[in-house]
Image (tube, rainbow, N blue to C red):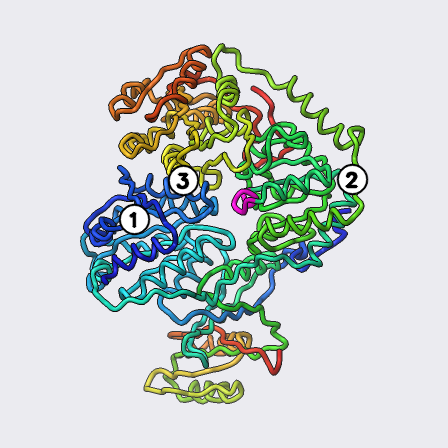
Amino acid sequence: MIGSEALVRALEAEGVDFVFGLPGGANLPMYDALVDASLRHILVRHEQSAAHMADGYARIKRKAGVCFATSGPGATNLITGIATAYADSSPMIAVTGQVPLAMIGKDAFQETDIIGVANPCTKYAFQPRAAVEIPETVKKAFYIAESGRPGPVLIDIPKDVQQARENIQFPDLIKVRGYNPIIDADLSQLERAVETMIKAERPIIMAGGGVILSGAFSELQAMAELLMAPVVTTFKGKGSFPENHPLAMGPIGMHGHPEANKIIIEADCIIAVGARFSDRSVGRFDEFGKGMTIIHLDVDPAEIGKNKAVDIAVIGDVKASLRTAVKMLAKHKVVEKTKDDPWLKRRKELIDYYADTIKDYPRELTAKKALKKLREILPSDAIVTTEVGQCQMWASLHFDVISPGTFFSSTGLGTMGFGFPASIGAKAAKSQATVVDIAGDGSFNMTENSLAVSVLEKLPVIVFLMNNYMLGMVAQWQRTFYNRRYMGVHQNSCPDYVKLAEAYGAQGIRAESMNDLEGAIKKALKNDVATVIDIAIDPEEDVYPFVAPGTGLKDMITGA
Amino acid sequence: MAGLLKTADTLSQDDAESWHIVAALVENKPGVLFRVTNLFRARSFNIESITVGSTEQVDLSRMTITTKTDERTLDQLVKQLRKLIDVVEVRVLDSSKTVYRELALIKMKAEEPTKRMQITTYASVFRANILDIDKNTIMVEITGTPDKIDAFKNLVSSFGIIHLARTGVSALPRGEY
């Protein structure tokens, strides 16, 4: 057996059914091995999209997505997608071809030190230097990518190693001595955490992406209901808790729900679950949580105290920790809170207050109304990805996630171009689901050539394109902080998205009114090809509320 | 109720900097030093010295890192180091329970015999060795704690130091510590 056959066999042994990639000189042996493989290869038009597709696939399956690229530019094109997965703790295996061993370090054609490049944005990067090392490398790569706090792992294989014919063995067990993720939390710490939660008068749960990564939805809900604690999420944690639940408050942060931003600063105890206190979520580190007790549950010990000193740390898989916490809570006699509980009354008060306070943008068709309409028509278990910018923040504010784990966005790195390929990856992972990319024109431009993939590979998704022909979020900041001195934000009515969709064999529908939009969404749901709904959004429509960078949540601006 | 329960993870808000020795056992393979130093660079951890060398186990290397930092940054440095797959073990060593040494080579100007005599005298007080002498220069090897080396360096600086090479600190915990 040669190295590349061993690679494909090792991937099959891990249960891989999709590989997203693009061939080139240095990974030709891998592509030759794919001819006889049982897994399906999805040919992309740019390697960045391959990584995002693998990422979208991974977020649905909660196991590693796989992407392939050749050496040099193929590998560097993957990097944005790898860094996106790293920032959002998404499990991924990126396999790159490399120039032959003897050529490494000689500045060969299409040679890049991809191990060096990938180092800061991967959990680990391997370079097997003999074909016999490949099966063990693949097994270790999956173990590292999927366990603990998940993340991307790169495997860079020199071409001669791919081609070498050797007597290759497949190990059943592997051990990585320096890597021992903590699954089960320390029980005494957990007990202290639970006792503190119960004593709190104004507890709040802040659910982060870790809840989604570990699939701890029912455990989170059980804890919230036992404590009768309102639940806010980080943006990454959006969809960790049903947003139509009576305790749900929605995301906090720079463009968080106003009632969520307000209630968290009034709490006396914050229970952060799988959250990392990012600047976009908490505003100023020194101000956030001041005078409150902070309990932090996370699988990654390095997150404890990184941005925020906490009072009680519970290190372990949050699903396991929450399950135990729920058992402990059930044993303690939690005083049943009624509707008259002042804290729950305050929750209701804030929701009502902001429902009346935030003014709608005066136009027949707005982003807010469009997203409310989309939610109304879409099945509750539809999968939604987003692009980055205003469209993403509007989605955060105005699109309620009902089924946990159906909303995915590039929240950490904020990668424009993520949503569309990620939606195709999600469709590959769950073909029966309706998949929608909530997009803006600027972001969609970055990976729009994935239309070819969606059409040819029969992975139809809906691109819900809120089009203001602007780099809208930048324009909003230029309006707000730079006295409307616009620079580099106008897209000048180019391209025509209906024609663009049609050029790829997809369908394009223009929506100029709410009536058009309703018809377009219904039509798109019936389509069996990718549909781009080109929605005319006013370029002056801003995203509010807004917590300006460098300020605290209390400084939230609710309108222009 | 804030501050009711403090864990080991909750470190003092005191951001006074002090000197620390961090000892790590790491996989003995290519790229490990790069991963460690790249981590320090990426997260803006300042280090004073780093040494790497073989250990009693062929597949492990010992890294000794010295850093002048506050407690919170030290805590992050240790946690981020532990997160690296190639790092097997990390400890912050209490300097009172640790033997730590550094070696320095110092080449000085010494044309006149009186200067040579003086340097030789100083060297013997510091238990330093004269390694090389030629017509115009003298080279001294000194081993000890960084403080001792600093003291010797300051003492001989008036002679005119031509080159100075310090190895950085190596450390091992005492006895059972």
Chain label for disc 2: A
Q: Which residues are magenta?
A: A209-215
Kindly identify which numbered label has been placed on residue A429: 3
Decide if residue A419 is on the left or right side of residue B12. left
What SS does tag 1 mark?
A: loop
Name the side, left or right, on which A318 lies relative to B162. right
Residue A442 placement: quadrant: top left
What residue do we see at 55% from left, 45% from top? A210
Question: Which of disc 1 and disc 2 is earlier in sequence?
Answer: 1
Residue found at x 61% / y 52%: A320
Which of the two discs, 2 and 3, labels the residue nearer the N terminus? Answer: 2
Residues B20 and A336: in front is A336
Chain holding disc 1: A
Name the amino acid type tagged 1.
Ser
Q: Closer to the observer: label 3 or label 1?
A: 1
Q: Secondary structure at mark 2?
A: loop
x and y percentages locating residue B177 in the rendered image: 62, 78
Q: Position of residue A466 (x, y in %)?
A: 42, 21
- Whether the magenta-drawn stretch holds residue A225 is answered as no
Label for residue A38? 1
- Which amino acid does the dot numbered 2 rest on? Glu
Amino acid type, mark 3: Ala
Q: Is residue A44 above or below residue B51?
A: above
